Image (cartoon, helix red, strand yellow):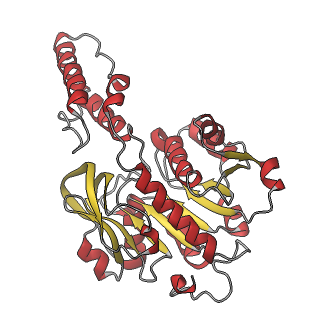
Amino acid sequence: MPIVEHSGLPTFRDLRRQGLTVLTLKDAQRQDIRALHVGLLNLMPDAAFQLTEQQFIRLVGGSNQIAQFYVHCFTVDGLPRSAATQAYIAANYVDLASIYAQGLDALIVTGANVANPHIEQEPFYRPLTEVIGWASENVTSVLCSCLSTHALMKFLHGVDRTRLMRKQWGVYSHRVVAPQHPLLTGINTRFDVPHSRYNGITRAQFEGAGLGILIESAEAGVHAAVSADQFRHVYFQGHPEYDAISLLKEYKREVLRHFAGDRDLPPFPDHYISPEAAAVINAYLAAGETARRAGTPLPAFPEADVAPFLDNTWGDTARTIFDNWLGLVYQLTNLDRRLPFKAGIDPRRPLDGL
């Protein structure tokens, strides 16, 4: 399903250079194909804002190559932004009024960083819940990532996430729990998913709220769950959108905080750093400690030297799940993108209409 370059969003050009099929608006308009309109509600902080945008658009554009996708990026108030990011949003993102007026077939909500112990205390929580309230009535399916999953579980089900004993950080083996669910068609029964979070929602909490478990890990817990209707809300606790180096960049950030005196030395993310990568990083850490004791400049973190030793063991599965999700949206959604379902679909049991 090719992405359509319907605006000046720089990510479209970047993804084309990376080899993804991206149609120009002129070429798209020559094809007699029903387009899908997918919203991307980006809640990420400035440092990861454009990268997260690119990761999710890549997942959308990497699915079935028949239909066309218009990805409408937007955000909400209550998130601290630099002047540069504000300018980027003003130039490239859609305002909420336009989203509400024109409608969406599907919606992706990214994760976010929080500063308060309770999600509902975050300034962006109310604007987020207003979007979710609208989407629950007007959008065929909403897919949530990590923190947004926790926010929706609080808003829709009154479920509070639990603080973990230590950060769930790494790449973990997962297994399919509901192999007959159409979202899981064609994927391996066991595969990896990255996680990066300090809080979690347990299987018992998901099930207590009436949700269905799709994918879980013995180490990392539930990764994917669906609402009681099996499709209107899809919840991820992990990060299938991550690039191979995403956890490395998080580790680099924490190591630099360590050398700045803001924290202790972080452990390696679980099941992620190969022996070859560890050797490069350990040499850097030793050189960094020497520089700190001597009061000399810290050496540059060897990101480029470590990256070739990192593996992506989750990308194929992530693309298949997104392909299944968008394919189901395509089959169920109304031709009028302001309406969630075509005639005859019961919103309480939408998959029965397939």
Q: Is residue 63 above or below residue 302?
A: below
Task: Using the image, determine if residue 268 lies above or below residue 106.
Answer: above
- Residue 13: x and y in percent read 66, 37
Image x and y of residue 277, in percent: 25, 29
Quadrant where the N terminus lies? bottom right
Quadrant of the rendered structure where residue 209 is?
Answer: bottom left
Q: Nearer the viewer, residue 41 or 350?
A: 350
Q: Does residue 110 appear in the picture of this structure? A: no
Indicate the quadrant where residue 77 lies.
Answer: bottom right
Residue at 56% across, 85% down: 347
Q: Which of the two residues, 332 or 195, is positioned nearer the viewer here?
A: 332
The residue that appears at 57% across and 85% down in the rendered structure is: 353
Can residue 344 be seen here? yes
Judge from the rendering whether residue 265 lies leftward or rightward of residue 24; answer left or right: left
Tell me residue 202's x, y (percent).
25, 69
Image quadrant where one finds the C terminus = bottom right
Q: Quadrant of residue 136?
A: bottom right
Q: Where is residue 115 in the image (x, y as percent from the top left)?
A: 35, 52
| Up-down relation of residue 173 to residue 349 (above or below) | above
Q: How many marks?
A: 0
Residue at screen point 35% across, 78% down: 212
Report the front residue among 277 and 124: 277
